[in-house]
Amino acid sequence: MLKSLKFHKNWVIALSISFCFVLLAIVGTGTKSAEAAVDIDPAAIYNIIAKHSGKALDVRNGSSDDGAAIQTWTYNNRGNQQWRIVPTGDGFYKIVAVHSGKVLDVADGSYANGAYINQWSDNGGNNQRWSIEPLGDGSYKITAKHSGKVLDVKNGRTDDPAFLHQWPFQNTDNQKWFLQRAN
């Protein structure tokens, strides 16, 4: 009787372990790259629209200078509201302002909550690389590679201008973005 009970116990353990391996093989590990999760055309030009306000990601005053602030502003489809989203080959993207050729950048490579977002010449820094993850409602969260914090409209403001900073993801609409092809 004892041998039979021990056999059944070992059999149940072996079966459970086998089941786990089969389940992992079917489901996978869930580690798709950010690039694979999003259908982005690197040749296309996009407007990036804040879900909470309907306003466009915008380089302040159409500046071409390093350090120019990124804000949301009433949609006008000008070059300072147009962006190319270019894969960097490692599951991340650089987000390039069409009018200046400069990229979205977390100021000074800061890791701090509330660090402002600006444009800067591309230097390959991780503070200039972003993951873009669909949220299931047509919107995306855009996350800085270096800090793991998301593109956030400060204080959820809806007026012009509303400045951007990085902030931990809280699933609020001022952290969600629509990617719409420019006309």
Image: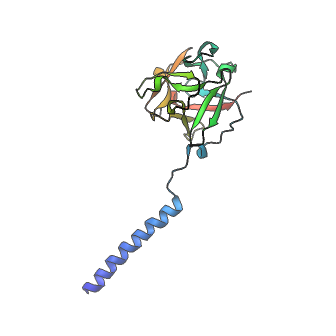
* Quadrant containing the N terminus in the rendered view: bottom left
Q: Position of residue 138 (x, y in %)?
A: 60, 37
The residue furthest left is 2
Q: Identify which residue is drawn at 66% across, 39% down.
A: 40
Q: Is residue 89 above or below residue 97?
A: below
The residue furthest front is 123
Q: Identify which residue is drawn at 37% across, 77% down.
A: 11
Left or right of residue 162, residue 183 in this image: right
Q: 49 and 81: which one is in front?
A: 81
The residue furthest bottom is 1
Which quadrant holds residue 7?
bottom left
* Quadrant containing the C terminus in the rendered view: top right
Q: Position of residue 101 (x, y in %)?
A: 65, 24
Q: 46 and 112: which one is in front?
A: 112
Left or right of residue 1, residue 160 in this image: right
Q: Is residue 12 above or below residue 146?
A: below
Q: 57 and 89: which one is in front?
A: 89
Q: Is residue 25 above or below residue 46?
A: below
Q: Position of residue 128 (x, y in %)?
A: 54, 30
Q: 83 and 158: which one is in front?
A: 83
